[in-house]
Image: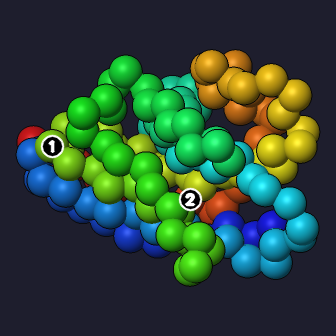
Amino acid sequence: QLHLVESGGGSAQAGGSVRLSCVATDYADGDYYMAWVRQAPGKEREGVASLDTDGTIIYADSVKGRFTISQDKAKNTLYLQMNSLKPEDTATYYCAAVESARIPDPWADINKHLDELEYWGQGTQVTVSS
């Protein structure tokens, strides 16, 4: 059972930056597809960025050029660096994962597969003020 714990959320001004971290523990043998998903009040969940085991990274159009997903395998930590923040980035951000063995074909659009993500963190709130 993989456990994911996010940290780093908080408040920021528009144009500012925040870095989120997600520490993974209780790894079972295997590789994991990792992702950041956000949900704003009254809105659907949105896949923000994903990192496949072969290094493929996909970003939502809404964050391209502003957000960067990365991983430090030695620390079992996934990051999301968020720059040039906008008020519409306000949301609860979740780290999520699924064993890559459960993905027979690469996911071109994570938003079509959100229910297939097996492991979720508790979420961390990011609030961006104008």
Few, some or many C-alpha atoms within 10 Å of disc 1 (few <14, some 14-19, many ≥20)? Answer: some
Residue 23 to residue 47: above or below:
below
Tell me the SS state at disc 2: loop
In front: label 2 or label 1? 1
Instruction: Look at the image and tell me in which quarter the N terminus lies.
Output: bottom right
Q: Which residue is drawn at 89% across and 70% down?
A: 28
Residue 40 to residue 60: above or below:
below
Residue 123 numbered tag: 2
75 or 109, which is in the foreground?
75
In the rendered image, residue 60, in percent from the top left (x then y), is placed at 43, 26
In the rendered image, residue 56, in percent from the top left (x then y), is placed at 56, 37
In the rendered image, residue 19, in percent from the top left (x then y), is placed at 32, 63
Name the N-terminal-most of marks 2 and 1.
1
The residue type indicated by label 1 comes to Ser
Q: In this view, does 111 lie to the left or right of 114?
A: left
Question: Residue at the front extreme?
Answer: 54
2 and 1 marks in contact (CB < 8 Å): no
The residue type indicated by label 2 comes to Gly
Res 4 quadrant in image: bottom right
Tell me the SS state at disc 1: loop
Residue 84 numbered tag: 1
